[in-house]
Amino acid sequence: MELRDYLAIIRRQRWLLICTLFLTLAITTIGTALRMPVYEATTQLRLTTVREDGGGIVNYDTEYADRLMNTYANLAESAIYRQRVDGLLGFGGDAEFIVDTIPNSELMTVSARMTDAQQAADAANALADLLLGVDMGRANVANPISGYTLLIAFSADPPSTAKYPNWTLNLALATLLGSLGALALAFVFDGLDTSLSDTRSISELVKLPTLAEVPFIQNDLDHTLLGLPEVEAFRSLYSTLFQRQGGAATEVLLVTSAEQGEGKTTILINLAFALATARKRVLVIDANLRAPQAAELLGVHHDKGLSNLLSNNATVNQVIKPSGLPLISVMPAGSLRTGRLLYNPTVKQIFDDLRRHYDVILVDSPAMLQFSDAQVLMPSVDGVLLVVDKQQSRRETLEAVQLQLSNMNVKPLGVVVNAGEEVSAFGRNGLQPAHA
């Protein structure tokens, strides 16, 4: 995966990231606020040792000082001295004592932690006073004239702020861990999510170029096509499909989708409108014999159509009707609701005969994974346009479509992505979503 792939995942899962981080910070904030504050007060002691050699010269005995400081530290942290402090101050054993010796110095610190700042200071000073009263013995066999002095460098004062909880540290750790956890969840959920909201992923799955990405369009069955503010998307699609051929030959194009409801019929009609505005004679054939919509959306209501033509119950002139829009004609599905008629070998001959009268023929079919009708029609057309709704399509769906296309002797031209932004293509009021 490239960097842009990771950024795309973050963009798709941005609300999961935001919610996870917010929840982590909220839990941390509540937990920190509910925790009892702990104050730490510190008394500092100084221990000096001296010895005289035979010439009356005074030297510092650092080795002896280290042993003494370790002894004092062990005494201060013992249960006996904690009990003595509790006995003096009556705290009931709530104090926690920490004794540290400062390397390469004569200093040691005695700290007390309690939930009350004043009591913490009193406990630290009381323990220091107890240590001052300890007699370690002044006699030293090797150095009989040795001595030491333990004194208070400074006494503990009540701290103004609590040592725990540490708000800055807690929130910083929550932000870091929450962000890492949110990223991990984002990648897990994205891997489990089979939806496709990225146009590049769609093209890679079906192994076809993206010819256009258009807004999601709503249909109103009670009104005729008025045009799109986003008509440039369809003009661009027209240019990509037809201008490369210089207008020399009639194109017969099948427009289909993986599943029902991805907007293929709507996009077919708007493509027809874009072609008509470019002065192309367009025939729309409604080959969705099971659930026809194209003719009705174009305002054509006629009992006879493709199914009647294939069953020899009508002629070509009887089934082709003007749509009411300049340069756009319609062949409705007809009165027979069965896809078996599309297996008729005359389908290709009918399409070839119609080429003489139109510049472009657009064929609407059922969804590929719903019925086999689209696959039956593919050998009779010049190319296939696959309409994919970004909000509806799934990885496994497009993988199945790609497998079917690869096994067909057909020329798939590319993908038209239905992007999801709702724009009215039909009517003035009472808009209803189309799922054709």
Image: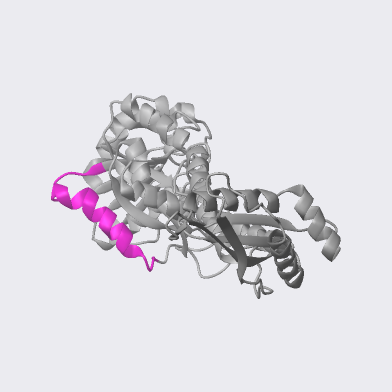
Q: Is residue 239 magenta?
A: yes
Which residue is drawn at the image coordinates 37% and 43% (left, top)? 201
Against 23, residue 385 (above or below) is above
Residue 435 visible at all: no
Judge left or right: residue 182 versus residue 232.
right
Q: In this view of the protein, which residue sits in the foreground, 143 or 239? A: 143
Q: In this view of the protein, which residue sits in the foreground, 157 or 106? A: 106
Which residue is drawn at the image coordinates 48% and 37% (left, top)? 289
Q: x and y percent of residue 417 in the render?
A: 38, 49
Judge left or right: residue 239 versus residue 185.
left
Using the rendered view, name the quadrant where residue 86 is placed: bottom right
Q: x and y percent of residue 385 in the render?
A: 33, 42
Residue 87 visible at all: yes
Against 142, residue 103 (above or below) is below
| Circle count | 0
Q: Is residue 173 magenta?
A: no
Q: Residue furthest front?
A: 55
Q: In this view of the protein, which residue sits in the foreground, 198 or 181? A: 181
Q: x and y percent of residue 100 in the render?
A: 58, 55
Report the span colored magenta: 227-251
Q: In this view of the protein, which residue sits in the foreground, 19 or 301? A: 19
Q: x and y percent of residue 412 in the render?
A: 29, 36
User: Does the magenta stretch mainly form a helix, a strand or a loop?
Assistant: helix
User: Dividing the image into 4 quarters, which one contains the N terminus?
Assistant: top left
